[in-house]
Amino acid sequence: MRTFIALKLPDPIRERLAGYQKQIQVGSTVRWVAPQNIHLTLRFIGEINTEQLESIKDMLKKITADETKFRIVLGELNGFPSKYRARIIWIGIADGYERVKSLMQRIDGELRRLHIGKPETKELIPHITLGRAKIPTPISGPTLPELGFVVNTIYLIESKLTPDGPIYTDIAEYKLK
């Protein structure tokens, strides 16, 4: 099964971001993330077997046992590799950035220790992907009003790829203190 670890956004914030997608100006065709699939990936894992799944579940229980709830506030529109040649269109994290990044690093370190998934080679930048462009495109959009929420749960999610886009199914959830 193909998996990743993520933070889910509350429905009202996902709905606001879905509306915001329509306000983003792009220079080429973009495949927008479906509103129900908007999330913040802590770590993409990829294909795993049943034994690895159990190891990941144990790891997440251990990590969340001493992590406390925290608040994040969404930041500015940006893109990878840049706002002027975006292939990935995303929203950053303004408040709570260091907590999310620390959580990403901790998860990545534990997965490396367990030899599960491909080790992350790029800099970890907490973000919420809104869309993907087939060719690099400049992007711009209005400033988002302040949108924030409390992070109190981490999700282990299965991703099934279909011609109509991915279908995400929760495998397990882990509450923070």
Image: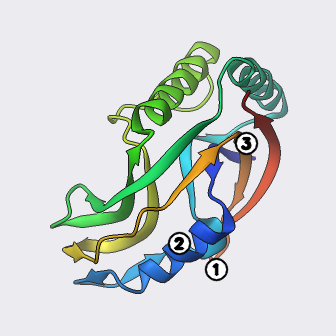
Could you tell me which residue is drawn at 63 percent across and 77 percent down?
Answer: 163
Q: Residue at x 23, y 75 (%)?
A: 140
Taking the spot 65% from the left edge, 26% from the top edge, the residue there is 68
> Which sits earlier in the primary sequence, circle 3 or circle 2?
2
**Which of the pair 69/166 is nearer the observer?**
69
In the shown orientation, is residue 175 left or right of residue 91? right
- The mark lying in front, picked from 1 and 3, is 3
Q: Earlier in the sequence, mark 2 or mark 1?
A: 2
Q: CA distance from mark 1 to mark 3?
A: 22 Å
Amino acid tagged 2: Val
* Crowd around label 3: few <14 · some 14–19 · many ≥20 (10 Å): many
Q: Nearer the viewer, residue 46 or 86?
A: 86
**Mark nearer the N terminus (1 vs 3):** 3
Whether 16 is drawn above or below 49: the answer is: below
Q: Secondary structure at mark 2?
A: loop
Under circle 3, the secondary element is strand
Q: Quadrant of residue 96?
A: top left
Q: CA distance from mark 3 to mark 2?
A: 19 Å
Task: Give the residue type that dot 1 points to.
Answer: Asp
Mark 3 sits on what residue?
Answer: 156
The residue where tag 2 is placed is 33
For the image shown, how many numbered marks are present on the structure? Answer: 3
Q: Quadrant of residue 177?
A: top right
Place of residue 30 in the rendered image (x, y in percent of width and height, measured from the top left): 38, 80
Q: What amino acid does circle 3 point to?
A: Leu
Going by the picture, which residue comes out furthest to the left?
Answer: 84
Task: Between label 2 and label 1, give the one nearer the viewer.
Answer: 2
In whole angstroms, how far apart are the C-alphas of marks 2 and 1? 11 Å
Q: Nearer the viewer, residue 54 or 50?
A: 54
Residue with the mark numbered 1: 164
Residue 65: % across, % down: 75, 19
